[in-house]
Image (spheres, rainbow, N blue to C red):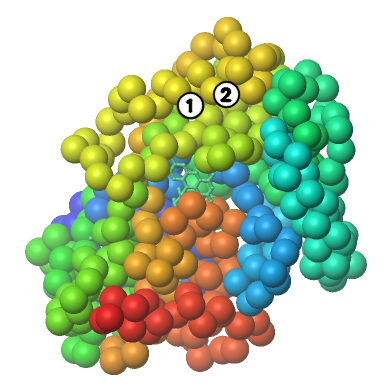
Amino acid sequence: MPQADSPALLSGQSADLLIAGGGIMGLWAAVYAERLGIDTLLIDAGRIGGGASGGLLGALMPHMPDKWNAKKQFQFDALLSLETEIAALEAATGLSAGYRRSGRIIPLPKPHLKTIALRHSADAEVNWNQQGRAFHWHVSDQPAVSGWIDPAAGGSGFVHDTLAARVAPRSLVSALRAFLDRARHVRIAEMAALGSLDAEAGTAEIDGTRMSVGHCIIAAGHASFPILQRFNPGLPQPLGQPVKGQAALLKADIDPAFPVIFRDGLYIVAHEGGHVAIGSTSENSFADPHGTDDQLEPLIAAAREMAPVLADAPVVERWAGLRPKAIDRDPMVGRHPDHPRLHALTGGFKVSFGLAHRLAEWVTREIAGQPAGFDLPDSFALSSHITAASR
Ligand SMILES: Cc1cc2nc3c(=O)[nH]c(=O)nc-3n(C[C@H](O)[C@H](O)[C@H](O)COP(=O)(O)OP(=O)(O)OC[C@H]3O[C@@H](n4cnc5c(N)ncnc54)[C@H](O)[C@@H]3O)c2cc1C
């Protein structure tokens, strides 16, 4: 498959599908386009996986098992099918995505949290018991594993959820890229930014080069919002915004099967090879989009306290990225209501890695005119976000 590093190589090209953005969303879309046999050009303004998807955490965190709805069902199905998708990807490429259903531990510092957790446990027995698979929300006095979370952290006990998982973001991105490097229908161009796009005429300008395109998927992470906004210039509110996050990677002698620890926005994720990712800040305003600063230090300190095995673990990397948060907080997916060849695939905010493959399948099948065989929650539709931004 030809690869273009320079936009000059795009000259004279056309594609039935242009995917703008090679993060987790655009990569999965390209994989599905390949499977569907759609002639596709995947472009990235920088490097593939160089945006938010090139981070450290990769926690795959289920929604709470209570108050079941279409959104929770969609995520449940996605978390289940991701297991199969990753196994297929690893078999095809020979690369590991660093995936493991390692579960999640949530400490319960107060008695009322235990009462709520016991209710959730009963909910999980019903709502997480589907398709021949049963996952649990165990509540116990002691942590599910020893040598990891401090037993004193759970004054009223611990939750151990068996549905949560983790993946190594950069390993998954590399595996997706390797799959696409062998694709028959997908070409990749890096350092190639989408400029103007005429969704009616089917033309796109990529770094000054004009191309003829059939459909276009906007999968440019947080940069998708201003691109999509151009097609609805009168909206009183932005379709979405970037939310900065900072994370750190520690090196420690730990069991990679240890569950993800989660408490009040603090994530501690054990990965393969003695790596532990810690995150994340959540910053709506920031001066430096990619730099790390002092806001990360309290998280690292809290993680060392929560998991004493990390007390002296050296920090091997600090990293920051911009999450795409859509106006309604949900993913922003599917056909534009007034421009049938324009499609959104963004807004995964904090849960993109667990959903991207399923959202990508939905969008590419929509383009191919094939039923996906599953429903997209109404609140995910691009049209629903446009309505929200018009209020
Ligand atoms: C600190 C931190 C921790 C996180 N932890 C988790 C977690 O544990 N689990 C989870 O599921 N999610 C997590 N997330 C969120 C997750 O990383 C993002 O939601 C996800 O990576 C977004 O993927 P994307 O493909 O939409 O965007 P991106 O990965 O940002 O990709 C967009 C791509 O589009 C390209 N682009 C931009 N403009 C253009 C243009 N005009 N033309 C062409 N290309 C363009 C960019 O170069 C970029 O490569 C975390 C995020 C942060 C910052």
Per the image, label 1 sits on a secondary structure element best described as: helix
- Mark 1 near ligand 1 (CB under 8 Å)? no
Up the image or down, 189 lies above or below 381; here it is above
| Mark carried by residue 303 | 2
| Residue that appears at 29% across and 70% down | 239
Q: Position of residue 349 (x, y in %)?
A: 44, 56
- Residue type pointed to by label 1: Leu
In the image, farthest residue toward the front: 112
Dividing the picture into quadrants, the one containing residue 218 is bottom left
Q: Position of residue 325 (x, y in %)?
A: 38, 59
Per the image, label 2 sits on a secondary structure element best described as: helix
The span from disc 1 to disc 2 (Cα, nearest Å) is 6 Å
| Residue that appears at 75% across and 29% down | 155
On screen, residue 83 versus residue 23, left or right, reads: right
Q: Position of residue 384 (x, y in %)?
A: 40, 82
| Mark carried by residue 147 | none
On screen, residue 191 versus residue 365, left or right, reads: left
Q: Name the quadrant of the C terminus.
A: bottom left
- Residue type pointed to by label 2: Ala
Q: Position of residue 250 (x, y in %)?
A: 54, 20
- Mark 2 near ligand 1 (CB under 8 Å)? no
Q: Name the quadrant of the N terminus.
A: bottom left
Q: Is residue 295 visible?
A: yes
On screen, residue 57 versus residue 77, left or right, reads: left
Residue where numbered disc 1 is placed: 299
Q: Are marks 1 and 2 in contact (CB under 8 Å)?
A: yes
